[in-house]
């Protein structure tokens, strides 16, 4: 069975989208563990409600060793893929090396627009609206040493309207996130994703 770990920091709506797709049979994998860097994250409750093992790793306790602890747990539980879904801590060190091209992230913009340092949550949508773009969306990408700089797997777009608030745009983008993340996981678990330098090639057969 293909095993994934999901990393969260908050409500866990993207986690829920994965749970739902597993239950529906769309994803042939097991959520082996949910890891949060926030003990109060509601996503932990989502995991427990669905009989998924969840653990909270205090940033105060682990500090710069947080990625090392995630690596240790992921290896102990024989995880195949790590999915960061609204995870606000920076992944670094040996975790990136040991899981090269096996960590994916969902970002609420069409990378390379509105990404990088400080671009998370409503900040992303406020920046998109302020810039006046007509199209925004979400990106699923592999995680590398940079911030939102890894090879792009999937992008989905939504229209941006002149009267949009950041909250309204966020809601529209989130709906696409809930489609894109399970789709990317399915492509990877079925072996259809190949990475060549910066390009991600998706096989159709």
Image (cartoon, rainbow, N blue to C red):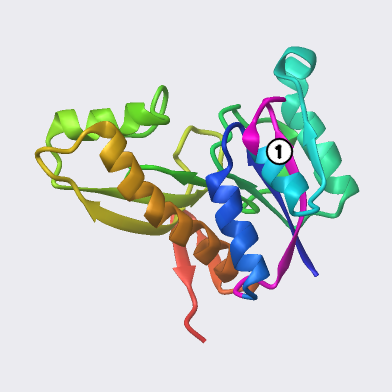
Kindly state the secondary structure of the residue where label 1 is placed: helix
Crowd band around label 1 with a 10 angstrom C-alpha radius: few (<14), some (14–19), many (20+) = many
Query: The N terminus lies in which quarter of the figure?
Result: bottom right
Residue 111 visible, this orientation: no
Residue 199 visible, this orientation: yes
Q: Residue furthest right?
A: 76
Q: How many marks?
A: 1
Who's the residue at 55% across and 70% down the image? 187
135 part of magenta stretch: no
Residue 170 percent location from the top left of the image? 33, 40
- Is residue 45 found left or right of 156 in the rendered image? right
Rendered view: 149 above or below 3: above
Residue 189 percent location from the top left of the image? 65, 69
Who's the residue at 72% across and 67% down the image? 29
Q: Nearer the viewer, residue 161 or 96?
A: 161
Q: Residue furthest top?
A: 60
Rendered view: 120 above or below 3: above
- Is residue 1 found left or right of 102 in the rendered image? right
Residue 198 percent location from the top left of the image? 44, 53
Rendered view: 52 above or below 114: below
Q: Residue furthest left?
A: 162
Who's the residue at 51% across and 66% down the image? 183
Magenta stretch?
A: 26-42
- Is residue 59 found left or right of 183 in the rendered image? right
Residue 184 percent location from the top left of the image? 52, 62
Location of mark 1 (residue): 44
Q: Residue furthest bottom?
A: 205
Rendered view: 156 above or below 118: below
Q: Nearer the viewer, residue 150 or 118?
A: 118
- Is residue 144 found left or right of 64 in the rendered image? left
Who's the residue at 67% across and 68% down the image? 23
């Amino acid at each position: 069975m293909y095993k994934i770990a999901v990393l969260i920091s908050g409500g866990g709506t993207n986690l829920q989208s994965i749970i739902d797709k597993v239950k529906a049979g769309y994803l042939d994998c097991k959520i082996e563990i949910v890891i949060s860097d926030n003990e109060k994250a509601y996503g932990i409750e989502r995991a427990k409600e669905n009989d998924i093992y969840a653990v909270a790793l205090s940033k105060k306790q682990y500090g710069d060793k947080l990625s090392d602890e995630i690596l240790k747990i992921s290896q102990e539980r024989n995880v195949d893929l790590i999915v960061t879904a609204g995870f606000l801590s920076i992944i670094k060190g040996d975790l990136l090396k040991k899981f090269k091209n096996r960590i994916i992230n969902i970002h609420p913009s069409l990378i390379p627009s509105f990404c990088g340092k400080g671009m998370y949550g409503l900040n992303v949508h406020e920046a998109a609206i302020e810039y006046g773009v007509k199209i925004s969306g979400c990106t699923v990408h592999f995680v590398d040493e940079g911030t939102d700089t890894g090879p792009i797997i999937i992008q989905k777009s939504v229209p941006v309207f002149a009267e949009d608030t950041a909250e309204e745009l966020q809601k529209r983008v989130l709906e696409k996130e809930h489609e894109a993340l399970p789709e990317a996981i399915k492509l990877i678990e079925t072996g259809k994703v190949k990475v060549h330098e910066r390009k991600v090639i998706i096989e159709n057969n």
